[in-house]
Image: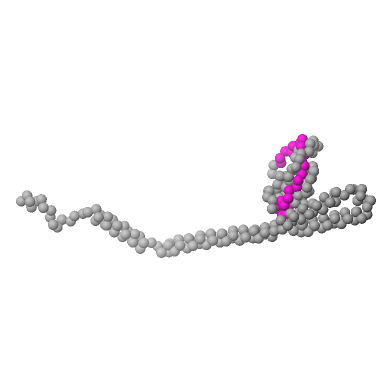
Amino acid sequence: MSDQNNTPQADEEQVTPKTVVEEAANSNQAEQAEAAAEADPIEALQEENAALKDRALRTMAEMENLRRRTEKEVKDAKAYAVASFARDMLVVNDNLGRAIEALPEEARETDDNLKALVEGVEMVEREMLNHLEKHGVKRLSPEGEKFNPHFHQAMFEVPNTEVPNNTVVQVVQAGYVIGERVLRPAMVGVSKGGPKVAPVADKPAEPGSAVDKEV
């Protein structure tokens, strides 16, 4: 009798952990299938359309930025392609100026042949500068202006109490710019000991003052 009570019944259903996991998985899959069946197809298409539109706008913006960068690079290449050649021509122009300065002033006035030679050299110098200017090269004439480290290179200081401090009082070598870039800074002497100029609020920036790069 006691043996019969201790023996588990054959028809009793046994629950194992594996069975619980399988039932939970089946229930989750059923819920997902039901949710997918109840999803609005129009809403799904609208979301897909919005995603495609956003992607298209981003692509168009990237293409526009690429176009602008390419245009700027082409423009800069045209503007500054002659920079190296122009810099070499400036050396030739400097030598022409030195040749004229080396001639005594009296000899220029008394010797007609020498006077004609000087006039010819000066004409060549002017013609060279005119052709360089056609390619965007401009000469800097900073004497009397405030020293600007973007365009000028200070070589020495000149004690002078009559002009504002840090004013260009002498140009040792002319400077040149090409477009908005410095081709060669002007070598200058600046004043020292004069009154300081107080900064003016909202003063318009000097043209090209943000440029500090030589080409």
Residue 153 falls in which quadrant of the image?
top right
Residue 167 visible, this orientation? no
Measured as percent of width and height from the top left, residue 42 is found at 43, 64
Residue 135 visible, this orientation? yes
Q: Pick whichever, 156 or 150, lies toward us.
A: 156
Residue 194 falls in which quadrant of the image?
top right
**In magenta segment, residue 60:** no
Q: Pick whichever, 15 or 27, lies toward us.
A: 15
Residue 45's place in the image compared with 152, above or below, is: below
Q: Pick whichever, 96 or 174, lies toward us.
A: 96
Q: Residue at x 71, y 51 (%)?
A: 182
* In this picture, residue 129 sits left or right of residue 63: right
Residue 101's place in the image compared with 194, above or below, is: below
Measured as percent of width and height from the top left, residue 144 is found at 79, 44
Measured as percent of width and height from the top left, residue 72 is found at 65, 58
Residue 104's place in the image compared with 57, above or below, is: above
Residue span colored magenta:
177-200
* In this picture, residue 145 sits left or right of residue 118: left
Measured as percent of width and height from the top left, residue 197 is found at 74, 38
Q: Which residue is drawn at 24% across and 56% down?
A: 19
User: How is this picture coloured?
Assistant: one colour
Q: Residue at x 78, y 54 (%)?
A: 92
